[in-house]
Amino acid sequence: MRSLLLLGLVAALALPFTAGAQQWHDVPLPEGPSGANPKILDIAMDGDTVWLSTEHDGLLAYDGSTWVLHVHADGGLRSDAFRNSIFSDALGNKWTARDGSSTLDRLDDGGTFSDKSDDTWTYYDQGSELLSGRVFSMAQDANGNMWFGIRDEDSNQLSTLELLIENDPSTPTDDEWLTYHYNDALAGFFTNDVRELAIDNLGRLWIVYYHRGVDVWDFGDYYTYDDDTIVHYGLTEGLPSDVIHSVLVTGNGRVWLGANNGIAVFDAAGETWTVLSDLGVDKITDLAEDVQGHVWAATDEGVAMLYSSGELAKFHTTADGLKDDLVQLIAVDRTDGTVWAVTEELSTGETFLNVLESGFGPDSDVFAYPNPWKQGESTEWIKIQGAPEGSTVEVFDITGQSIRKLSATREPYIWDSLNTDLNEVPSGVYVIRVKMPTGEVAFTKVAIIR
């Protein structure tokens, strides 16, 4: 009986919900030194400012109204070319890495986004600080130290990972650099071509390799392998593919891998994997989390927004305003939910910056989460997102009978799964109607499982 009920709820939830007024639009990019439309290679957020590293046009930064370009001609950035990655650390410093001997440039903009007169640049070079000149990924651990993943497609095996221990971030004179080698038998790294890095909530380093799965390295002491453990995951260990494009650690401690053929989610509490393979896309290219705990996935067919449970909430395509359905990069402003996506025109290779503004403001889609809500399993009450303050929010059963009106509050509204008489409602699918102060009406559904 329970299995039949679950099938019925899943079928009911598969019905499309009413979309609100959310629309993507593309943001024209400024002309850089190349004179052409800048080709974006990586994206990062610093507060409400989006940072873009480019192929030939240095670093671009946009705060929603003003563009600032950091290029070699300014005397700060050492090269405009092949800025393959950009990373914003816990202090707001921007690290940018390129493929060359002058490998890393770090920018402290002095807290003034548009004024470059107080910028401070710090430089790190192959042969002086780093052993390798091919940094393509970065991560910062809980101690504030920076990890750099080396893309060793030439198989010179100079290094797999490099670690910068900054004893005093204000000066490089007491910096410590440690190098970890693929060919060191004590290390046990699976291979030596690193494409993505992330630190999970237990302090472990997740190392994504080119077409070779992922290592999870519990590195313990920085200086010795004696207390280390490395576990490798790939297709044979249950991942949807060995080809992994992105890694994301969410606030609840789960680790999400964007791969070919789906998303794999690792729950550290139970050391278990869940594979989400029902998005109907070939490739998950990038992942980001918003402040509500939703995961936004860039795919080769659009942008998917998923609940923290892994269920699909909405899929965005060119029909929703995206410039192209091939989405390479994604980032979320955690202050207001604005979503930034980089799309690519496949035939030309041209990239475009797309924005979904006010992701959780008055014009957003209405949805409920967790969905389904399962008694004994869900750890929070049902939240109705996208209903601005002053909305009339009402819950109906599947027959259309009103069973509960929710008190006016700030977004999100919360339903405790009780009816007007404060009795538990039975298992089933419930319709939530939101009438906004503007008069706009939107609907969504939520399933209750007891």
Image: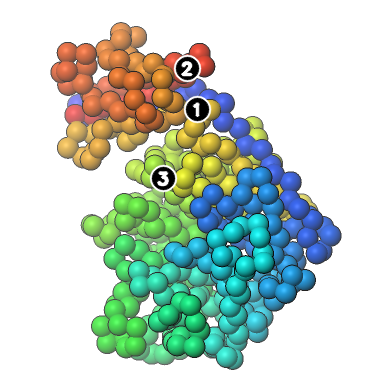
Question: In front here: 301 or 423?
Answer: 423
Residue type (three-letter) at the residue carrying disc 1: Pro
Residue type (three-letter) at the residue carrying disc 2: Pro
Question: In front here: 16 or 227?
Answer: 227
Q: In the image, what residue occupies the spot 47% across and 45% down?
A: 335
Give the image location of residue 267, x and y in percent. Answer: 29, 55
Residue type (three-letter) at the residue carrying disc 3: Val
Q: Which residue is mark 1?
A: 362
Answer yes or no: do the residues labelled 2 and 1 have beta carbons within 8 Å?
yes
Q: In the image, what residue occupies the spot 46% across and 77% down?
A: 169
Question: In front here: 203 or 63?
Answer: 63
> In what element is the residue under mark 3?
loop
Q: Earlier in the sequence, mark 2 or mark 3?
A: 3
> In what element is the residue under mark 1?
loop
- State the image quarter where residue 24 is shown: top right
Q: In the image, what residue occupies the spot 65% across and 57% down?
A: 114
Q: Classify 10 Å Cα crowding around label 1: few (below 14), some (14-19), many (20 and above).
A: many
354 vs 75, left or right, is: left
Q: Which callout, 2 or 3, points to the residue nearer the camera?
A: 2
Q: CA distance from mark 2 to mark 3?
A: 24 Å
Give the image location of residue 287, x and y in percent. Answer: 49, 53
Give the image location of residue 268, x and y in percent. Answer: 28, 59
Quarter of the image with the C terminus is: top left
Can residue 310 be seen at all in this image of the molecule? no
Q: CA distance from mark 1 to mark 3?
A: 16 Å
Q: Which residue is mark 2?
A: 437
Answer yes or no: do the residues labelled 1 and 3 have beta carbons within 8 Å?
no
